[in-house]
Amino acid sequence: MRNKMAANNSIGAIELSSIGIGYRVQDEMLKAASVRLLIARTICSGKYFIIIGGPVSDVTSAVNAGVKASGEAVIDSLIIPNVHESVFEALGQSVVLAAGQAEALGIIETFSGVSVIAAADAAVKAARVTLFRIHVAMALGGKGFCLMTGTVADCRAGVQAGAAEVRRRGLLVSEIVIPRPSEQLFSEYI
């Protein structure tokens, strides 16, 4: 998944409250501009989630067409020009951490899948953190979360930047930094 996504310098995403409308919106987005479909799937609570990639102008056109076609079904949307490449790896859950790498664990929890992507991108651009997981709304009741590691100061800076982005959207659930976390918290990533 990483190579497919990393080839794009911009991403756009739309989260919808209707699966049927989600398919219609996905079709409209793909017809509106030259974009690549990166993720399109149902997510918890009967919602539909779409991520596209490509040049900024094409992604902007496609997201605008999708939002217009969605009517009142749009929950959240975003366009990130020059998305940080580690977002793709974390979305693909392909990050492996070295044993003992984590001085701290940073967690941002959101009420939507789209907003957690915005949070993760803001966090990794603001601080020297390793973003190692972005979990989008599956088995979470529609929520999202991202996990990062680094020094305590860097995790605090990253979590603060990502949480500010989500808070601006009114979708923040929690922002947590755990200094000296138990290595067992990372068992599936080491």
Image (cartoon, rainbow, N blue to C red):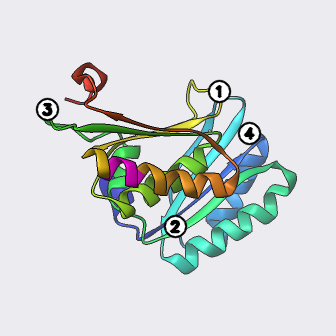
* Residue 159 in view: yes
Instruction: Give the residues drawn in magenta, as a range.
Output: 154-158
Q: Tell me where residue 158 appears, x and y as whole percent.
A: 39, 53
Tell which tag, 2 or 3, sits nearer the viewer.
Answer: 3
- Compare residues 185 and 63 and report the one nearer the observer: 185
| Disc 4: which residue | 19
Within 10 Å of disc 1 (Cα), the crowding (few <14, some 14-19, many 20+) is some
The tally of labels here is 4
Q: Which tag, 1 or 4, sits closer to the chain's start?
A: 4
- Amino acid type, label 1: Gly
Q: What element carries label 1?
A: loop
Q: Is mark 4 on a helix, strand or loop?
A: helix
Within 10 Å of disc 4 (Cα), the crowding (few <14, some 14-19, many 20+) is some
- Compare residues 17 and 165 and report the one nearer the observer: 165
Q: Are marks 1 and 2 in contact (CB under 8 Å)?
A: no
Tell which tag, 1 or 4, sits nearer the viewer.
Answer: 1
Residue that protrudes farthest toward the bottom in the picture = 57
Q: Tell me where residue 21 appears, x and y as whole percent.
A: 78, 47
Q: Which tag, 1 or 3, sits closer to the chain's start?
A: 3
| Disc 3: which residue | 100
For the residues labelled 2 and 3, the Cα–Cα distance comes to 32 Å
Within 10 Å of disc 2 (Cα), the crowding (few <14, some 14-19, many 20+) is some
Q: Do the residues labelled 1 and 3 touch (CB within 8 Å)?
A: no
Tell which tag, 1 or 3, sits nearer the viewer.
Answer: 3
In this rendering, position of residue 163 left or right of residue 15? left
Q: Are marks 1 and 4 in contact (CB under 8 Å)?
A: no
| Disc 1: which residue | 141
- Using the image, determine if residue 183 lies above or below residue 82: above
Residue occupying image coordinates x 37% and y 63% = 125
For the residues labelled 1 and 3, the Cα–Cα distance comes to 32 Å
- Amino acid type, label 4: Ile
For the residues labelled 3 and 4, the Cα–Cα distance comes to 42 Å
